[in-house]
Image (cartoon, grey):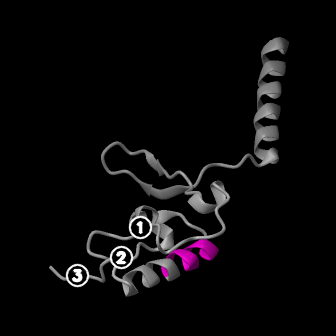
Amino acid sequence: MDLENTENVENNNNEEEIKAKGEKKPHFNKELNEKDGRKKFFKKKVCYFCKNNIDVLDYKDIKLLKRYVKDSGKIIPKRLNGTCSKHQRLVTKAIKRARNIALLPYETRY
């Protein structure tokens, strides 16, 4: 009986230590998924430009700029594409310049 009690005390101590350390949990949506009752976990988006050390964004680089424009011609917001605010401003400025000289289309209505 003494061995069982000591094992239980050790397990409780380990659980308390884990809680005390404050291990970080990944970001998740607090609402449970209706189908299977699990929490939804999201992967944090990383800025493409910060990751690849790109500081200068050229308005003539259409292939890169098309990644940040929807098919309708709208600029994708930073919360959806994961860019940081500094680079989002540069992307927006480059897209507007490219539109001005007709390299990219303005918004189109269906």
Range shown magenta: 85-92
- Residue at x 78%, y 15% (from the top left corner): 4
Asked if the residue at tag 1 contacts the one at tag 2, i.e. Cβ–Cβ closer than 8 Å, the answer is yes
Report the residue marked by disc 2.
Answer: 103
- Residue at x 83%, y 12% (from the top left corner): 3
Q: Is residue 41 above or below residue 30?
A: above
Q: Position of residue 8 (x, y in %)?
A: 77, 24
Q: Position of residue 42 (x, y in %)?
A: 50, 52
Q: CA distance from mark 2 to mark 1?
A: 7 Å
Q: Is residue 47 visible?
A: no
Q: Tag on residue 13?
A: none
Report the residue marked by disc 1.
Answer: 62
Q: Amino acid at mark 2?
A: Leu
Badge 1 element? helix
Asked if the residue at tag 1 contacts the one at tag 3, i.e. Cβ–Cβ closer than 8 Å, the answer is no
- Residue at x 80%, y 32% (from the top left corner): 14
